[in-house]
Image: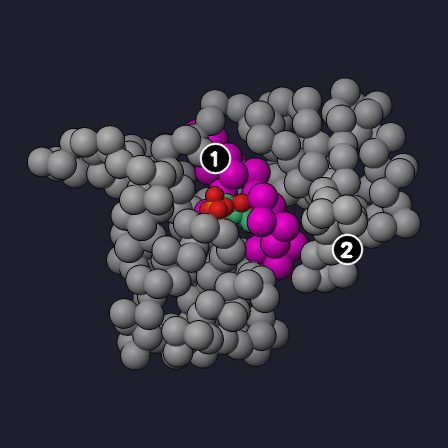
Amino acid sequence: MSNSPAPASSDQRQRTQDELKTLVGHAALDYVVRGQWVGVGTGSTVNKFIEALASIRHDIPGAVSSSQASTERLRALGIEVRDANEVDRLAVYIDGADEIDGKGYMVKGGGAALTREKIVAAQSDQFVCIADGSKRVQVLGAFPIPVEVIPMATARIIRQFAAMGGQAAIRMAGAKPLVTDNGQYVLDVKGLAISDPLGFETAVSQWPGVVTVGVFAFQRATTCLLATDAGVQTLSF
Ligand code: 5RP
């Protein structure tokens, strides 16, 4: 990992998390390849990026989006959105994370969009993760690991996580299970420290009924823009 120094800043006051997200959302514009489709993730940090992207919408053909929520925001700002199947390769995918470690491995899915996020990331040459400093961790797993599952497999998958020492619970939307853009459920798994992200992703992805595990090791970040009070730090992996 190379770690470029934060740019000098005369404004060293403590920024709010919203300000940090705005800062890093705008910084991500530098990574958008003009003239090419861009992959767009999901979440409150990405929403800041989408606002910034509107300022250069005439310089790109449009976006491939990882969720219905991001698609609606993009279209509302006049940015064309295409289905992932209509665009072969994306130069860059820009998305947030719930946690990112020193190798660019991430936990994602806090916004329940993990499956489409992994799909768009997989067709992108670069993954630029945008996050505030609170997301940088030594070991993944303090944030509950999201896992999208097919509803009929839920009880068994909860037992499989229990056998590993994890406590999995169905994510709720009010009194009912949250239903993803793909019509499935999400489990949030607490109590696991992920010391081997590649091994964990490989193993859990093979359990019948698992649609996507929210550990992004194979689709890790190639760059992370980390917003701090001192400015945006660039981590390259
Ligand atoms: C959505 C995600 C988000 O990227 C992740 O939850 C971070 O979101 P935010 O920028 O709101 O903190 O994986 O599924």
| Vertical relation: 57 (above or below) 125 | below
Residue behind mark 1: 100
| Vertical relation: 150 (above or below) 81 | above
- x, y percentage for residue 118? 60, 53
> Residue 174 or 42: which is nearer the viewer?
174
- x, y percentage for residue 146? 66, 40
Q: Earlier in the sequence, mark 2 or mark 1?
A: 1
> Residue placed farthest to the left in the image?
10
Identify the element where label 1 is drawn: strand
Magenta segment includes 130:
no
Magenta segment includes 108:
yes
Say which amino acid is labelled 2: Gln
Q: Depth-wise, is mark 2 or mark 1 nearer the camera? A: 2
* Residue located at (18% from left, 31% from top): 13
Asked which quadrant contains residue 3, the reply is: top left
- x, y percentage for residue 60? 34, 75
| Vertical relation: 114 (above or below) 146 | below
User: What is the span of residues highlighted in magenta in the rendered image?
Assistant: 96-118
Residue 211 visible in the current orientation: no
Q: Is residue 100 shown left or right of residue 112?
A: left
* Residue located at (33% from left, 53% from top): 25
Residue behind mark 2: 184
Image quarter (top left, top right, bottom left or bottom right) of the N terminus = top left
Main SS of the magenta segment?
Answer: loop
